[in-house]
Image (tube, helix red, strand yellow):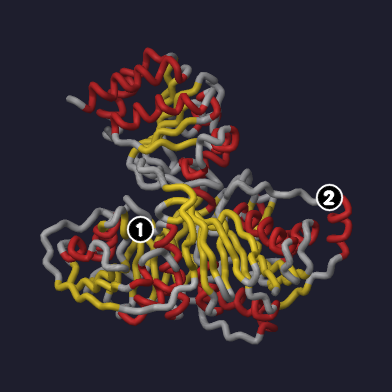
């Protein structure tokens, strides 16, 4: 039984995002990282491998620079690395999901892990969408998972609280932040990862039909500027500020 | 163009966001039907003005949440070219799964919707806004509290359908109940504490204020990571919840970029911190340089006075 983990490379949380000419200026982004929720998926994928899964396959889709996430995944235990290379700056959900589903089929994994949403687009479509295309079950907002015979037991944040669920058969789990500590690679892992081959595949080599895009990016813009804030000294100013919340901001 | 809204349930009744979904879609026209998974809130949905039909889909599969079972159960009754849900965790999953099953594109967490169809949404945790053109048919999830709700007074016909659907996700054990308290992602006012609160027991003072103004209580990542008494469900920020209340009150929170990512889109921000250099003051509309010990009692007193006016 193989486990696939989907990783997306996104600007680091600390990166400054600037818009020039109605597009986010990518050249100004100096640091790219694995999307934070995907890191939790990766950590749980490694735990599944340690408890008996056959193979851990890390999959990413993106430009050349995205291969760095795969090498980072290899440094903590990924066995096989698949990179679907594309330079597209915007892909609609149908395109992304058919590419990733096809890559998962190629990996022959029947357990798939990914973050509940990516830190750049903040969407959360990929996990449930890919599960639908593959005909897998889907469990969202998982914080921990373990393998118990042929069944997966997972903790998820449900609408009524934290609950333990079991899922059988092929499934896709999306991850939230939980109590799990992320491991850091050791030196040996990093050295080995550098030598690990990456299967680089073009979208055209997947043998899938990508139709014309049905959602397209029209523009990026910066959020509206806020007027500079008003600053007050000491708790004595609370009465004034509460008055402003009522009369200026009209929020209470 | 026909609109199909998949309703959101909250506390065994219809969540108010459902009326906002009707309000959002009425601006672009079309017949509006509402599907209520598990039948929850169907009679309330029928009273929303502008709704022409309510389909109450009921069956054992709705006893607990299984994304694919729910989607497969409601899929045959989705007859329209615009499918809408709220952008709650479940709403996003349902939108994405239905869209994939129907081969529709999906755009999540939209904050504006115009004829055409063009939508806008916040990306990079609020650091930029993108405008996307989508062709019909499509699925959209909508951010709560960004659209005017449709009014009441409707009288739509309710059709009840019983379905049987195989479930593959089984709930074995409830580990921790979600607080009876208001969730930060849903509240119109949020008051959050950081490590500057000194001790988790001091959050009780924040709850006192919250009660006064009907607010939810949140926390920074530093507070959640430091004190196990503060659950992750309260965390606002990059790996916690993104909130967009009318008023966000940050107490003893320095304002790490990860925290700002989760709350900077709030309409108004009030920051209370003893460190005049704290980065939180950079995004605050109103900043008060003071300790929480001095400020919170005064805040409670003056809010209470304003609320009873």
**Residue that appears at 34% across and 27% down:** B209
Residue B181 against residue A222 in the figure, above or below: above
Q: Position of residue B180 (x, y in %)?
A: 35, 43
Which residue position is annotated with label 2?
A186
The kind of secondary structure element at disc 2 is: loop
Alpha carbon distance from label 2 to label 1: 47 Å
**Residue at position x 47%, y 41% in the image:** B234
The reply to whether callout 2 and callout 1 are in contact (CB within 8 Å) is no
For residue B40, which quarter of the picture?
Answer: bottom left
Residue A204: x %, y % from top left = 67, 83
Give me the chain letter of mark 1.
B
Who's the residue at 59% across and 37% down the image? B225
Instruction: Decide: is A183 above or below B99.
Output: above
Left or right of B1: which side holds A47? right
- Bin the neighbour count of mark 2 within 10 Å (Cα to Cα): few under 14, some 14-19, many 20 and up: few
Element class at badge 1: strand
Does residue A84 appear anywhere in the picture?
yes
Q: Quadrant of the C terminus of chain B?
A: top left
The residue at the point 63 percent across, 59 percent down is A41
Q: Nearer the viewer, residue B210 or B122?
A: B210
| Residue A209, image quadrant | bottom right
| Image x and y of residue A44, in percent | 66, 58
Q: Which residue is mark 1?
A: B112
């Amino acid at each position: 039984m193989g486990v696939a983990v989907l990783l997306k490379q996104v600007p680091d949380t600390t990166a400054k995002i600037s818009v020039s000419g109605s597009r986010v200026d990518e050249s100004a982004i100096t640091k790219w990282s694995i999307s934070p929720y995907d890191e939790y998926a990766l950590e749980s994928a490694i735990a599944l491998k340690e408890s008996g899964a056959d193979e851990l396959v890390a999959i990413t889709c993106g430009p050349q620079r995205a291969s760095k996430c795969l090498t980072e995944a290899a440094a903590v235990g990924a066995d096989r690395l698949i990179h679907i290379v594309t330079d597209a700056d915007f892909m609609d959900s149908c395109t992304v999901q058919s590419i990733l589903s096809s890559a998962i089929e190629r990996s022959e994994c029947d357990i798939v892990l990914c973050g509940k949403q990516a830190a750049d687009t903040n969407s959360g479509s990929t996990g449930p969408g890919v599960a639908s295309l593959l005909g897998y079950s889907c469990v969202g907002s998982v914080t921990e998972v373990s393998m118990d015979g042929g069944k997966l037991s997972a903790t998820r944040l449900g609408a009524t609280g934290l609950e333990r669920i079991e899922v059988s058969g092929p499934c896709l789990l999306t991850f939230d932040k939980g109590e799990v500590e992320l491991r850091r690679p050791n030196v040996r892992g990093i050295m080995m990862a550098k030598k690990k081959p990456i299967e680089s595949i073009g979208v055209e080599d997947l043998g899938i039909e990508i139709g014309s895009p049905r959602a397209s990016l029209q523009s990026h813009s910066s959020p509206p500027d806020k007027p500079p804030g008003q600053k007050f000294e000491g708790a004595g100013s609370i009465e004034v500020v509460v008055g402003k919340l009522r009369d200026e901001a009209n929020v209470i | 163009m026909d609109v199909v809204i998949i309703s959101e349930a909250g506390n065994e009744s219809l969540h108010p966001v459902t009326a906002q979904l009707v309000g959002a879609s009425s601006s672009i026209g079309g017949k509006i039907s509402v599907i209520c998974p598990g039948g929850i809130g169907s009679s309330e949905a029928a009273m929303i003005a502008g709704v022409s039909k309510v389909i109450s889909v009921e069956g054992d599969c709705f006893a607990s949440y299984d994304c694919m079972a729910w989607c497969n159960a409601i899929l045959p009754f989705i007859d329209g070219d615009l499918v809408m849900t709220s952008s709650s965790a479940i709403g996003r999953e349902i939108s994405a799964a239905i869209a994939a099953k129907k081969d529709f594109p999906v755009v999540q967490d939209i904050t504006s919707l115009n004829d055409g169809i063009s939508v806008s949404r916040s990306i990079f945790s609020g650091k930029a806004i993108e405008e996307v053109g989508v062709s019909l048919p499509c699925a959209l999830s909508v951010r709560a509290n960004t659209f005017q709700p449709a009014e009441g007074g409707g009288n739509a016909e309710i059709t009840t359908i019983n379905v049987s659907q195989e479930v593959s996700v089984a709930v074995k054990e409830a580990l921790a109940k979600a607080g009876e308290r208001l969730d930060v992602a849903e509240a119109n006012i949020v008051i959050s504490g950081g490590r500057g609160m000194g001790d988790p027991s001091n959050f009780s003072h924040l709850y006192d204020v919250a009660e006064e103004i009907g607010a939810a209580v949140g926390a920074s990542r530093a507070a959640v990571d430091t004190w196990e008494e503060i659950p992750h469900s309260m965390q606002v920020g990059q790996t916690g919840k993104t909130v967009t209340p009318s008023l966000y009150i940050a107490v003893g929170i320095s304002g790490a970029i990860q925290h700002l990512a989760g709350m900077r889109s709030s309409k108004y921000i009030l920051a209370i911190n003893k460190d005049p250099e704290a980065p939180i003051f950079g995004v605050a509309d109103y900043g008060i340089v003071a300790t929480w010990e001095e400020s919170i009692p005064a805040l409670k007193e003056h809010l209470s006075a304003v609320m009873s006016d």
